[in-house]
Image (cartoon, rainbow, N blue to C red):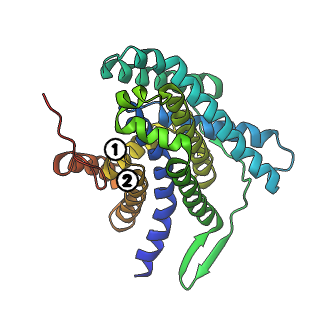
Amino acid sequence: MNLFLQQLINGLAWGGIYALIAIGYTMVYGVMQLINFAHGDVFMVGAFVGLVIAQLLPDKTSPLSVFLVFLSAMFFSTLLGILIERLGYRSLWRKNAPRLSLLIVAVAISLLLENSGLLLFGAAPRSFPEIIPSKSYFVGSIIFTNLQLIIILSCLLLMGILHLIVMHTKMGRAMRAVAEDSEMSALLGVPRERVLSFTFALGSALAGIAGVMVALYAPQINPLMGLLPGLKAFIAAVLGGIGSIPGAMVGGFVLGEAETLVSAYLSSSYRDLLAFLVLILVLLLRPQGLLGKGVVEKL
């Protein structure tokens, strides 16, 4: 029982990280009907921005330094998300280009970011500075670290802020309107392009923060680090119901817990296999996901 509770705590940290990345996938899909496969590489950029800023700071462990690292990662990831939307997707979206064209552009942007990272930083993993010294706490025989606690609480706080933005702000209402009916929202005067930029900015900011969290939790980063977490976050979004923000949150935590339990009770070599098995089962048994709605398309 103690092992089970221990793994639940471990799984919450990874689940929160998957959820933050998955939210970006699901928001862009809801507004644009596009799977932005470059999103995982925005996560990678956030980690490297955090690395560069942390190396420049003289006192790396001060609260101000930690704040600057997270703020810088969020800021540059946000700018990158807006740049990707403006240069990569907007003109195609205006022309109602086929989804395959948008998907090809997404893959091309992903490869561009990965190879740019390899060119700038090399392929060798880099150690992330310990800007938050790790401390361990015990509750009976269960152990958890301050990093796990910070990640879990930060993820919940960010999700709460996101919920307030989407449900209780003017831009949030516009996002929901475009996601519900893009053409009708345009006829009613909703600024779709501004909504699209805001959606990319918001999702990219969360991905950048998640990149620093992973860099702190597993302090080895490399330019290809966004590939697998990005795919798993996409699986989490599909599991929860692509296009549903609560679904992305639930899917992220469920996948994180499932991976951690499989690693503990079977083998860590099955961790990645489980994620893709979940994707196959969801697509076969419940394509709309846990919280998604089934949609009937007329021919």
Residue furthest bottom as drawn: 140
The quarter of the displayed image where residue 251 is located:
bottom left
Q: Earlier in the sequence, mark 1 or mark 2?
A: 1
Of 77 and 257, the residue lying toward us:
77
Residue 131, percent across and down? 74, 53
Residue 23 visible, this orientation: yes
Q: Is residue 82 above or below residue 266?
A: above
Residue 287, percent across and down? 22, 46
Q: Is residue 261 above or below residue 289?
A: below
Taking the spot 60% from the left edge, 22% from the top edge, the residue there is 119
The quarter of the displayed image where residue 104 is located:
top left
Dot 2 falls on a residue whose secondary structure is helix
Residue 24 visible, this orientation: no
Q: What residue would you read off at disc 1?
A: 242
Q: In the picture provided, is 25 more to the left or to the right than 194?
A: left
Q: In the picture provided, is 128 more to the left or to the right than 59?
A: left
Residue 93, percent across and down? 41, 20
Q: What residue would you read off at disc 2?
A: 247
Q: In the picture provided, is 238 more to the left or to the right than 53?
A: left
Image quadrant holding the C terminus, namely top left
Taking the spot 63% from the left edge, 30% from the top edge, the residue there is 79
Residue furthest left as drawn: 299
Check contact, mark 1 vs mark 2: CB within 8 A: yes
Taking the spot 51% from the left edge, 24% from the top edge, the residue there is 85
Dot 1 falls on a residue whose secondary structure is loop
Under mark 2, the amino acid is Gly
